Image (cartoon, rainbow, N blue to C red):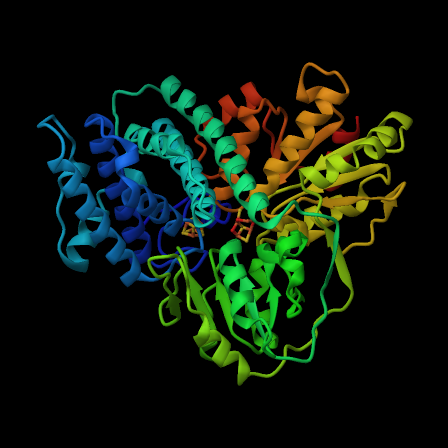
Amino acid sequence: MFCYQCQEAAKGTGCQIKGVCGKDEEVARLQDLLIYTLKGLAEIVVKGNLEIENLNEINHEVIKSLFITITNANFDKTAIEKQIEKMLGFRNELKKRIAEIPLGDATYFEVTGTTSMLEKASKAGVLATENEDIRSLRELVIYGIKGMAAYAHHALNLGKENRDIYTFIYEALAATLDDALSVDELITLTLKTGEFGVKTMALLDEANTSKYGNPEITHVNIGVGKNPGILISGHDLTDLEQLLEQTKGTDVDIYTHSEMLPAHYYPFFKKYENFIGNYGHSWWKQLEEFETFNGPILFTTNCIVPPKNEKVRDRIFTSGASGYPGCIHIEANQDGKKDFSPLIEMAKKCKAPIEIETGSIVGGFAHAQVLALADKVIDAVKSGAIKKFIVMAGCDGRMKAREYYTEFAQKLPTDTIILTAGCAKYRYNKLALGDIDGIPRILDAGQCNDSYSLAVIALKLKEVFGLEDVNQLPIVYNIAWYEQKAVIVLLALLYLGVKNIHLGPTLPAFLSPNVAKVLVETFGIAGIDTAEEDIQFFMA
Ligand code: FSO
Ligand code: SF4
């Protein structure tokens, strides 16, 4: 196996024996083969000029497949094998619809059973591209579209889709097989990936807010109640909605975990009396937190940490693109409805969660809420009460180096405001950083996809201050990344013209020295230093 798609890639270069995330060799290879299958399917769609609007189910399964291969989402070999078989079936069906034209290996290879899948996968992985710059750019695009697919999948679950996004995904997948593309053409494709990243995040924002309302300032309880609970993790709000509906009026409480925290900010979910609060920290602390939670846990997406304790594993359920061997997967029926009764019945027999902290955290500062406060914010900037906004969106992770983000937040001058989104916030969202004229010093917009909100806020401020360029605003970017959704957020920001983004705790292993050089020279991308030095740099 060889995988270097996330920030925790072994030795900063790539996982080769087993993933730091817990992904084993077979899962890694099957994921490679699933991606290769999608590339073949995409080549048929693109070269055969197939109409995207006639490919409904296939479009949906393509984005689901991409989502399955995101870091920490799915460790279930059987589920991945089934997905490969399904996508090969679609690929072969599409091939019959087009004229005979020259096509590559990905469009016609056949495999039967695990052994032949694994064998084929060994020739279809990342290292199959020999030139390291081409490989680097191809993977940058693939990781970007994985993140895009995850967001498109959430939007789809809410009934929103945009065929242009699917068209781009096919184009990008097929382009990664095209040996005729030059480095420059691949760089252009990378920026176009960012453009579609913006479109996808806007689509998801529309899907979320049209159904659940605009996030608003909310204090979220981090303590526990007396009833047994179900803990819901991941990012899918439609799963949460169904779970709340199915537990309404029962003695089973619902708690959010990690990236599900921002659900509390949406007006829609406030009517559920059993929606108690948020339990725990970001994803990587889950094993200890699941022990003390005592009740069933539902993963709607990543980030899953392989459970060591069987008793905990028996309480874990998955849905959507996520999966773990030995855990029950809740499938949606034809109408997208999921039956969460196995979790609810289990919860009734469990003890209430053990309280691990008390108090509350505040959030809900997505674009509508911040723009509602715009006058106050603008006055504070004009009076000098706010000197700088620091965008610290992104992901958390287990590396010790991430303590930097807590230290950085703590040491920032008191005339700065942190704008955040994603699970990166858990490194500082429980610190008492105070407020500036009533504006909290940490403004949490929501999940990682809500980084879109931060871009909307920046563009609005640019307009209000009559500036030509977003980079003239007193906003700086110190982003933490972990997996591929952060890659699409980064590409989206680059597309919007944001320069000098600092990215940490380490730069991606998949950037070859030459590709990294382009990013540094064109966009001013930089890594992180010590908290003190970086603060000095940002405040200058
Ligand atoms: Fe975090 Fe995991 Fe949201 Fe990611 S929980 S790391 S970028 O899945 O998607 O921020
Ligand atoms: Fe390694 Fe990250 Fe790939 Fe897992 S996803 S195998 S940790 S690079």
- The residue at 42%/60% (across/down) is 22
Q: Which residue is drawn at 60% across and 83% down?
A: 351
Q: What x and y, as percent, mark residue 172?
A: 34, 30
Q: Where is residue 111 in the image (x, y as percent from the top left)?
A: 14, 51
Left or right of residue 138, residue 255 in this image = right
Give the image location of residue 360, x and y in percent. 76, 61
Q: In which quarter of the image is residue 100?
A: top left
User: On the picture, is 105 further left or further right than 336?
Assistant: left
Q: Kindly tell me whether residue 308 is visible in this rendering.
A: no
Q: Is residue 384 left or right of residue 309?
A: right
Which residue is found at the position 67% from the left and 47% from the top? 215
In this rendering, the answer to whether 257 lies above or below 250 is above
Farthest bottom residue?
Answer: 349
**Percent x, y of residue 70:** 42, 49
- Name of the residue lying farthest toward the left: 100
Quadrant the C terminus occupies: top right
Residue 286 in the image: above or below residue 94: below
